Amino acid sequence: MSRTARSLAGLYGCNHGGVRGAQPHPPTAALAHNRTTASPCYHYRVFRRKTTGSVVCPSCGSLVGVRDDRCYTCGRANPGLWGFAPLLRQLGSDFGFVPIVVGGSSVLYVLTLLLSGSNMEVVGGGFSFLSPSGQVLLMFGASGWVPVFLMGRWWTLLSASWLHGNLLHILFNMLWVRDLGPSSVDLIGPARTIIIYTVSGACGFAVSTLAGLMLGGLPIPILRGGGITLGASASIFGLLGALVHYGRKSGSSFIRGQAMQYAVVLFVFGLFMPGIDNYAHAGGFLGGYGVSAIVNPLTRERGDHMLIAIGCLVATVLAILFSVLSPLPVR
């Protein structure tokens, strides 16, 4: 799907990945200026900070003075972001969504394996190979109705998307991230893709957690919800939901049809595989569709989107750190 969708994006001019117009480097003569003075060139060269001229308002895209207190078009306060608006725009154009997700998930998987020690399950039942211990996964931020309601670890709704239960689990999910990530970034924008990935994952685990609390006593396992749940699949379904919304709003029946086909196949596959959290998949898909409708992928990506994306990543890191530093209840 990724190559076809990217080709389609290029054909119809659908790249909304942000404005790439980074400020040019100052002339060589200006760089030779006395660096003991706080010149605009020095600020830009060292801190990427602009102290004079105009910048693009991160809310509406209008040109404003870098020192203006308010945007005259949309009314946003401090539209110049203390001179760092150009850096924000450049960061938005270069954001590496796939390396962030694959790298972060892989590092956490290796750490959970190492800390499992002798409790690591090298070969388990079914397709389980190299599985971290359940205690370590709980410590790093696995979610579900047990951690959230019995242990009070509500922040795990954010951390669980970055954890995986065995080698095939992370391999399968990261292959989907590598396939869907570039298409999502090309069509929706890098910052909005991170927002959708983070929020839809939290939505998926929230739905699974509530289902586990209310339906945990049902005799059919696939209807019980997640007692302890984790994995990137909720966020992956969020990307599929966002692509379905993009295809619907843009009029691209191909993108909408392909994304919906993938979602249906994966969801049906989860109904027949043990240990699959279908509530998280459904919640992630609905969350991705809803967030895409809010951030409107058919418009140009703004600086505010990048600020929110950074906030999502920071909140996720804090959730993982808080999980590790918070002692688990003694059973």
Image: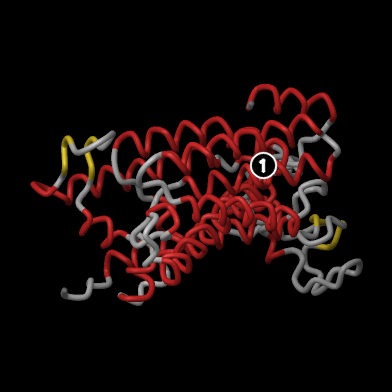
Which residue shows up at 61% across the image and 52% down it? 196
Looking at the picture, tell me which residue is in the foreground, 40 or 154.
154
Q: Can residue 43 be seen in this view?
A: no
Hey, which quadrant is residue 69 in on the image? bottom right
Residue 190 x, y percent position in the rendering: 64, 44
Residue 112 x, y percent position in the rendering: 24, 49
Q: Where does label 1 land, which residue?
A: 93
Q: Is residue 169 left or right of residue 210?
A: left
Q: What is the residue that sits farthest to the right in this orientation?
A: 73
Per the image, label 1 sits on a secondary structure element best described as helix
Q: Which amino acid type is marked by label 1? A: Ser
Looking at the picture, tell me which residue is in the foreground, 252 or 193.
252
Looking at the picture, tell me which residue is in the foreground, 180 or 128.
128
Q: Is residue 95 left or right of residue 119?
A: right
Q: In this view, does 244 lie to the left or right of 199?
A: right
Tally of numbered discs: 1
Residue 139 x, y percent position in the rendering: 26, 62
Q: Residues within 10 Å of mark 1 (few under 14, many from 20)?
A: many
Hey, which quadrant is residue 81 in on the image? bottom right
Q: Is residue 264 above or below residue 286?
A: above
Image quarter (top left, top right, bottom left or bottom right) of the C terminus: bottom left
Looking at the picture, tell me which residue is in the foreground, 284 or 216.
216
Q: In this view, does 176 lie to the left or right of 111?
A: right
Q: What is the residue that sits farthest to the front in this orientation?
A: 219
Hey, which quadrant is residue 62 in on the image? bottom right
Which residue shows up at 80% across the image and 60% down it? 57
Residue 200 x, y percent position in the rendering: 57, 55
